[in-house]
Image (spheres, helix red, strand yellow):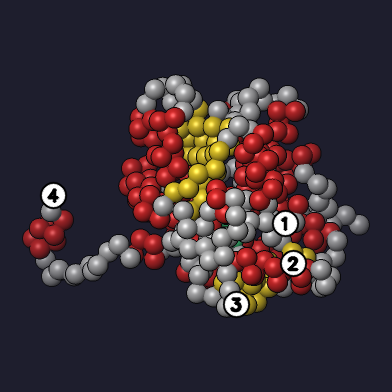
Amino acid sequence: MKAPNMNQGRGVIERFREFLPPCEMVVSLGEGNTPLVFSPRLSARLGHGCEVFVKNEGVNPTGSFKDRGMTVAVSRAIDRGARALICASTGNTSASAAAYAARAGIPCAVVLPAGKIATGKLVQAIAHGAKIVPIDGNFDDALRIVRELGAEKDFVVVNSINPDRIAGQKTAAFEIVGELGDAPDFHFLPVGNAGNITAYWAGYQEFHQRGKSKNLPAMFGFQAAGAAPIFHNRVVEDPETIASAIRIGNPASWKQARAALDESKGAIDIVTDEEISMAQSWLASNEGIFVEPASAASIAGLFKNGQKLRDGSRVVCTVTGHGLKDPDSILRRIHSLEPVPAKIDKVRRAIGF
Ligand code: F0G
């Protein structure tokens, strides 16, 4: 008997099945098909006839791009009769894995660096009923442990070392080509464990090989200055950044990311925490797009490198996760919100314009 289809008509497996590994049982929350928003103000900042688009992955079902890969990884885990899922995470993978596990009706364990997960992400993992195991260690330690547990067969690992994750995530590149009619000239994105840059490059190459696009973009990846192993070409033992999602010192897809950067004639660069915070505020207050700090690395990277792009370039910046994931990144900037008396004149004066 064919397994029932739990999807409601959206989702990347239904839309891109022919480009994905086979999935019998579709576990979907309607991920993908995210807005590619033209940004007049970023385009104006670059000048020289450049056009900048923001691919807003924060509007996926659990608020990050991870859902694209999770639907494929979890669907195929269920097809193989998996009994439980496990992942290491800086937060978003755990939120996504927990949600898709709940949808599939199987348990999920998440191994996290203690005290380093943004509030919203931890809340998601709790709400979806994941077994949360904080460790005294960083993400790289968590991933090492998860790899070992994954070898024991009780668990299917749903980190991006699982190729089904990468397969699902490449659909973002397909959507961009579909919407722009071709690949952009430049693609900017944040880099942590380096799965996403690997996935985008795979997606762009695949569409190019199949004759669906003429262009191939140069891939530009951005690491936080305190967590920049690929940029420095060495493992960072104690990575540190406010962009907790990309606080990673030894990325799992390092080699694949290096290949994507070299083959696409792109580059890896660093952005400071200050540049990240500034870009996060700028995007929220100038374009109405609220992203978490790690996501703003692509925008900070554009501010840093925008002048180097040739005239008339088309640029896509991926913003990877929603701003509500990490409310503290904004609340820290506000000292106090003093109440005023409940009188119209006092309120008018407090508004100040
Ligand atoms: N942006 C956000 C919001 C992320 O959560 C991540 C990774 C990245 C960018 C970097 O993507 O790892 O494919 O290079 N988050 C992982 C996690 C590590 O556990 O949620 P990458």
Question: Residue 58 in the image: x percent, y percent?
Answer: 51, 51
* Residue at numbered disc 1: 161
Earlier along the polypeptide chain: callout 2 or callout 1?
2
Whether the residues at callouts 2 and 1 have beta carbons within 8 Å, the answer is: yes
* Residue at numbered disc 2: 147
Q: Is mark 2 within 8 Å of ligand 1?
A: no
Does residue 49 appear anywhere in the picture?
yes
Q: CA distance from mark 3 to mark 4?
A: 49 Å
The N terminus is located in which quarter? bottom right
Identify which amino acid the numbered label 4 is placed on.
Phe
Q: CA distance from mark 2 to mark 4?
A: 57 Å
Between marks 3 and 4 in the image, the one whose residue lies nearer the viewer: 3
Find ligand 1 in the image and state its quadrant. Answer: bottom right
Q: Residues within 10 Å of mark 4 (few under 14, many from 20)?
A: few
Left-right relation of 113 to 327: right
Identify which amino acid the numbered label 3 is placed on.
Ile
Q: CA distance from mark 1 to mark 4?
A: 53 Å
Does residue 129 appear anywhere in the picture?
no
Query: Who's the residue at 85% across and 65% down the image?
Result: 81
Q: Secondary structure at mark 1?
A: loop
Q: CA distance from mark 3 to mark 1?
A: 20 Å
Q: Residues within 10 Å of mark 1 (few under 14, many from 20)?
A: some
Whether the residues at callouts 3 and 4 have beta carbons within 8 Å, the answer is: no
Q: Is mark 3 within 8 Å of ligand 1?
A: no
Earlier along the polypeptide chain: callout 1 or callout 4?
1
Q: CA distance from mark 2 to mark 1?
A: 9 Å
Query: Who's the residue at 81% across and 51% down the image?
Result: 23
Q: Secondary structure at mark 2?
A: helix
Furthest-right residue in this view: 1
* Residue at numbered disc 3: 135
Q: Quadrant of residue 274?
A: bottom left
